Image (cartoon, grey):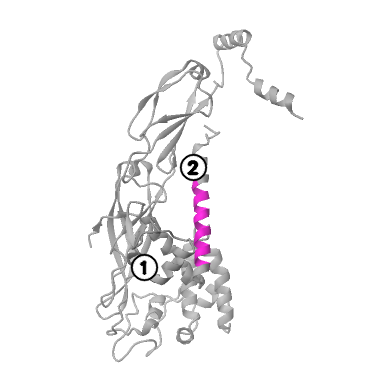
Amino acid sequence: MKYKDYYSILGVDRSATTDAIKKAYRKLAHRYHPDVSEDPEGEEKFKALAEAYETLKNPEKRAAYDQLGRHQPGQDFQPPPGWGPQHGDSQFAFDDADLADLFAGFSGGRQPGGGAIRMPGQDYEVTAQISLEQAYSGTEVELNLTVPEHDAQGQLHRVPRSFKVRIPKGATDGQRLRLAGRGGKGFNGGRDGDLYLQVKLQPHTVFRVSGHDLYLDLPLAPWEAVLGATIDVPTLGGTVRLKVPPHTQAGQQLRLSGRGLPRPHGKEGDLFAIAQIVVPATATDVERGLFEQLAKESTFNPRARLQQEMNHAP
Amino acid sequence: MPPEHAEPEWLTEDHAFSLAELAELSGLSEAELRELVDYGAVTPIDPESSPWVFSGKCLLTVRTACRLRISFDLEPYGVALMVTLLERIQELETQLRALRAQTPHADR
């Protein structure tokens, strides 16, 4: 079993009072708690903090932890003979256990091999990264977890579990799914835990996602914007023809109804093509001549509104 | 061991939970959940009806509440306040993402 230095995780002395331990924990928990922290590694850090605090705040567990002696973090070690919450000949399965599993045996008066307390299984939370195309058509992801489970004797083991989860079409970024009974096994008749899956969409090179709606930038040549055009636009379901009306302004959104992401129980989101007017980086002599002619002929003043606003400014 | 196949359920407005189910699935007691309702941190689909029915999204809120209560050792009122503020932040983040999605990218 690997040693963890609970005191250094919380940044306190071995002689720290329970109050000092609580203060240290609160300060760090606030910084790393996954519900409030923006740190991408916050969750892992918080788990370590919570595990350390869970043991050190309880005098009985803290004394037992101190009896394990001092080792380097990550160093393999064995608890001294007779250590911990074993009773009679029952021995803890140390090899595949985590340090936290050892101290879980202290809680709630549960004893290995017996005890009548019903313990619900642990809930697990996992994130599945999928592509926008996978969200559009639905997909299957494989989840591999290593989870603590009680055996028939009530001893904790770390066991690998593997799931194939069908993510039905209709999921979008941040969507949560629940897999009932797929968390940790309950003990003594307690219900099995659940598995909660959070869907994360990988960024897409063409589409941006907002809920079930999609946005894409649609570049138009100046003459397409003025004269109107029928152009091919990519969608997740294949290319579609879009009629750009004459006099389309930059930033104007052209809606392609039902071409967004499907919803779980309803109609599809929409795709919005945002008009962008782009000009050629270079122009041939002929093109230049045509633009010069246009400049001479046109009475269009793009800054009319700006001039009007300035004239009325106090 | 071959992977187990699992069918998920959506946690959206279309999925409903009773108070007892929320309590069992969140780890909070029914009394604590009633307090969260009193403080406005979660709202039943129809607060006037009896028994209360909650949307699937409420399960996420009350699970967060349970985590916060345990992690920060908070009173129900503190939990309700924190959950309400966190949801406000989430709403604002959703609006921000929507605005970003609607803003043309300058480099294209």
Name the chief secondary structure element in magenta. Answer: helix
The three-letter code of the residue at mark 2 reads Ala
Q: Residue furthest right?
A: A314
Q: Is residue A311 above or below residue B86?
A: above
Position above or below: B58 against A84: above
Residue drawn at x 46%, y 17% is A228
The amino acid on which the numbered mark 1 sits, given as a three-letter code, is Ala
Residue at x-position 35% and y-position 75%: A97
Q: Which residues are magenta?
A: B78-94
Asked if badge 2 and badge 1 are on a common chain, one would say: yes
Q: What x and y, as percent, mark residue A112? A: 30, 84
Tag 2, which chain? B
Q: Secondary structure at mark 1?
A: helix
Per the rendering, the mark at residue A75 is: none
Based on the displayed image, in which of its 4 quarters is residue A297 positioned?
top right
- Farthest residue toward the left? B2
What residue appears at the point 53 percent right and 36 percent down from the top-left corner? B103
Q: Chain of mark 1?
A: B
| Dot 1 alpha-carbon crowd within 10 angstroms: few under 14, some 14 to 19, many 20 or more | many
**Is B85 contained in the magenta span?**
yes
- Name the residue that disc number 2 marks: B98
Sequence-first disc among 2 and 1: 1
- Structural distance between the alpha carbons of marks 2 and 1: 33 Å
Q: How many marks?
A: 2
Specify the quadrant of the image occupied by residue A163.
bottom left
Residue ID for mark 1: B23
Is A106 on the left-hand or right-hand side of A38? left
Please tell me how crowded label 2 is: few (under 14), some (14-19), or many (20+) other residues with Cα within 10 Å.
some
| Camera-nearest label, 2 or 1 | 1
